[in-house]
Amino acid sequence: MPVTYLIKFQVVPERRDQFLELLEGVLDAMRREPTFHEAILHRDPESEHRFMLCETWQNHDDVVNVQLHRPYRRAWHEALPTLLEQERDITIWEPVRADRKQV
């Protein structure tokens, strides 16, 4: 069953560019994973240092046992303590319905 992660980040202001650069590399690599569905990065309109990432994957076990250990994530995970003002806020959700405009 698909699973969605909502991950909130409070970024150290001086580290914003580094945060985005490292995250963009991870997002670009994730897109090629066979169990990946989608990811949407949001910015808080009231703070350019608050972000929320919405990621959907095919299943939680694959994320925990395989995806989180991919080499392309190493630099990102190692840098997080210096990039963030506080721990990430991660919640897990099961999609019930998705509506998208047909292009």
Image (cartoon, rainbow, N blue to C red):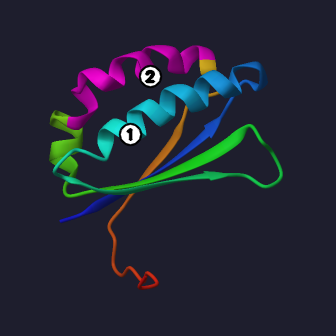
| Residue at position x 39%, y 33% in the image | 26
Q: Is residue 19 above or below residue 94?
A: above
User: Which quarter of the figure has residue 56?
Assistant: bottom left
Q: Which residue is mark 1?
A: 28
Q: Is residue 101 above or below residue 54?
A: below
Q: Secondary structure at mark 2?
A: helix
Residue 76, percent across and down?
44, 22
Residue 79 visible (yes or no): yes
- Amino acid at the residue labelled 2: Trp
Q: Which residue is mark 2?
A: 76
Residue 3, percent across and down?
29, 59
Range of residues picked out in magenta: 67-82
Cβ atoms under marks 2 and 1 closer than 8 Å: no
| Residue at position x 25%, y 21% in the image | 71
Q: Is residue 30 magenta?
A: no
Residue farthest toward the front in the current orientation of the protein: 103
Left or right: 29 with respect to 60?
A: right
Local packing at callout 1 (Cα closer than 10 Å; few below 14, some 14-19, many 20+) is few
Q: Nearer the viewer, residue 78 or 39?
A: 39
- Amino acid at the residue labelled 1: Asp
Q: Quadrant of the C terminus?
A: bottom left
| Residue at position x 50%, y 26% in the image | 22
- Residue 79's disc number: none
Q: Nearer the viewer, residue 39 or 95?
A: 39
Magenta residues, dominant SS class: helix
User: Which quarter of the figure has residue 4?
Assistant: bottom left
Residue farthest toward the right in the current orientation of the protein: 46
Residue 77, percent across and down?
42, 21
Q: Secondary structure at mark 1?
A: helix
Q: Quadrant of the N terminus?
A: bottom left
User: Which quarter of the figure has residue 17?
Assistant: top right
Left or right: 45 with respect to 10?
A: right
